[in-house]
Amino acid sequence: MKNKTKLLILNILIISFISTLLLSCSKKHNEKIIIEGSIVSDVYQYNIDGFMNTPYGKITIFTQSYFKNGKLYRLLCNRANGFLEYSIEDLRKDTQLYNSLNIDSLFIKNEEKFLKYKISTFRNDTTFYKDGQNVLIYK
């Protein structure tokens, strides 16, 4: 009888542990990514890691903006030798750089940017926007 009770308690602990793990993994993270790029030919080379295949063809990435809870917290710019990361402090100190990258600190303002794009395609949890040669990817 004691062994059955111990086994039952052990099973309950295991089930509660697994349930806790599943619940913690299923929490939605409020992180959004906006990737800006331009369509290029398949033979174009710049930064090997700075390309992405989209429904519109191969694009070269200009910037990758990471937003959490509506605020920009990370920015990557595509350069010939790889991606260059800018911190929020870098952008605050250099307003000319901030303005040249055409980004907004609040995510809601970026949603207005989507309205300028004429074509949109949805794939899984990603939306692709296109206007001429420019492509905006929203994850």
Image (tube, rainbow, N blue to C red):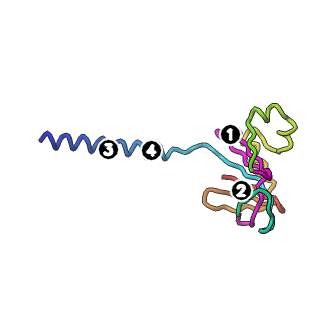
91 over 26 or under it: above or below? above
Report the residue at 73% width, 39% height from top.
106
Q: Which mark is residue 23?
A: 4
- The number of numbered badges drawn on the structure is 4
Give the residues drawn in magenta, as a range.
Answer: 54-81
Q: Disc 2 to disc 1, how far (Cα)?
A: 27 Å
User: What's the amino acid at mark 3?
Assistant: Ile
Mark earlier in primary sequence (1, 4): 4
Where is residue 5? Give x, y as percent: 18, 40
Quarter of the view holding residue 95: top right
Q: Disc 1 to disc 3, how far (Cα)?
A: 37 Å
Mark earlier in primary sequence (2, 1): 2
Q: Are marks 2 and 4 in contact (CB under 8 Å)?
A: no
Q: Disc 2 to disc 3, how far (Cα)?
A: 43 Å
Kindly identify which residue carries mark 1: 70
Mark earlier in primary sequence (2, 3): 3
User: What's the amino acid at mark 2?
Assistant: Asp
Q: Nearer the viewer, residue 131 or 6?
A: 6
Kind of element beneath mark 1:
loop
Answer few, some or many: residues within 10 Å of disc 3's Cα (few below 14, many 20 plus, some between 14 and 19). Answer: few
Kindly identify which residue carries mark 3: 14
Q: Are marks 1 and 3 in contact (CB under 8 Å)?
A: no
Discs 2/4, front: 2
Q: Does 51 lie within the magenta span?
A: no
Kindly identify which residue carries mark 2: 49
